[in-house]
């Protein structure tokens, strides 16, 4: 049995505050809904109505509007995992499914493969999220004011070496005489394509 002991009180990898455990069925349904209404100018309302009819998510009544807005509440999960292009980066009338999202939708990549691949690509848990409420007092009592510092202290890290060796092994299985991954290929194809940030925890 896996050791599920938390590295420190209140530790989590929070994709969204509206959902506890993210499972394959709910993630698939949300991505399918996004794909179904990706061309609609009012896709947010369409996805929300569609998901409400499925009764898969809790009805979070928003304090600002007094009504449920499933898309606004849960779409963050899709962008966090790189399954859609964040709508903050595109026109509000444009909803784009990423290549990884399409592979997952088509069943070419399993839920487990997708989560592992995207976690490694985006370096989750990466320490750049805010410190969760339960962990805040624990961190402050130790003079720690950054999530990445708290994670580093407790050995929470994703090592790109794991992704590198998995990629090399896959290349070896396909062609043992040419299992090579150059630094440029790693930089442009394998690792996360995001603006440079602070050094990743544990590197």
Image (cartoon, grey):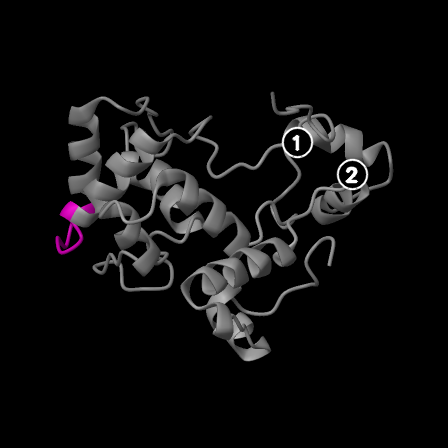
Give percent across and percent down for residue 155.
Answer: 76, 42
Q: Identify the residue at image location x=62%, y=58%.
A: 160
Q: Identify the residue at image location x=27%, y=64%.
A: 91
Closer to the camera, 33 or 91? 33
Q: Secondary structure at mark 1?
A: loop
Q: Secondary structure at mark 2?
A: loop
Give percent across and percent down for residue 131.
Answer: 66, 38
Depicted 88 relative to depicted 61: above or below: below
Q: Identify the residue at image location x=73%, y=31%.
A: 7
Query: Within the magenta stretch, is there residue 42?
Result: yes
Depicted 77 relative to depicted 12: above or below: below
Secondary structure character of the magenta stretch overall: loop
Depicted 15 relative to depicted 39: above or below: above
Closer to the camera, 67 or 40? 40
Closer to the camera, 197 or 101? 101
1 vs 2, front mark: 2
The residue at which mark 1 appears reads as: 11
Query: Within the magenta stretch, is there residue 99?
Result: no
The residue at which mark 2 appears reads as: 154
Give percent across and percent down for residue 177.
Answer: 50, 73
Q: Quadrant of the N terminus?
A: top right
Q: Considering only order in the chain, which callout, 2 or 1, is on the residue closer to the N terminus?
A: 1
Give percent across and percent down for residue 174.
Answer: 41, 64
Which class describes the residues within 10 Å of circle 2: few (<14), some (14-19), or many (20+)? few
User: Magenta stretch?
Assistant: 36-44
**Distance of mark 1 from mark 2, alpha carbons?**
10 Å
Look at the numbered discs 1 and 2 and tell me whether their residues touch, using CB distance below 8 Å: yes
* 198 to the left or right of 15: right
């Amino acid at each position: 049995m896996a050791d599920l002991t938390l590295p420190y009180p209140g530790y989590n990898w929070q994709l969204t505050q509206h959902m506890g455990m993210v499972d394959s069925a709910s993630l698939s349904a949300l991505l399918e809904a996004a794909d179904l209404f990706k061309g609609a100018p009012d896709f947010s309302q369409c996805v929300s109505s569609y998901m409400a009819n499925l009764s898969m998510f809790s009805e979070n009544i928003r304090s600002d509007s007094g009504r449920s807005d499933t898309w606004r509440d849960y779409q963050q999960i899709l962008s966090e995992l790189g399954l859609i292009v964040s709508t903050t980066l595109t026109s509000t009338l444009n909803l784009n499914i990423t290549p990884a999202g399409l592979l997952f939708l088509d069943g070419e990549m399993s839920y487990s493969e997708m989560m592992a691949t995207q976690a490694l690509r985006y370096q989750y848990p990466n320490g750049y999220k805010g410190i969760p409420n339960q962990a805040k007092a624990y961190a402050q009592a130790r003079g720690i004011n950054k999530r990445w510092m708290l994670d580093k202290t407790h050995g929470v890290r994703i090592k790109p070496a794991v992704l590198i060796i998995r990629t090399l092994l896959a290349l070896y299985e396909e062609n043992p005489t040419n299992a090579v991954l150059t630094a440029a290929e790693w930089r442009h194809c394998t690792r996360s394509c995001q603006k440079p940030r602070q050094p990743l925890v544990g590197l």
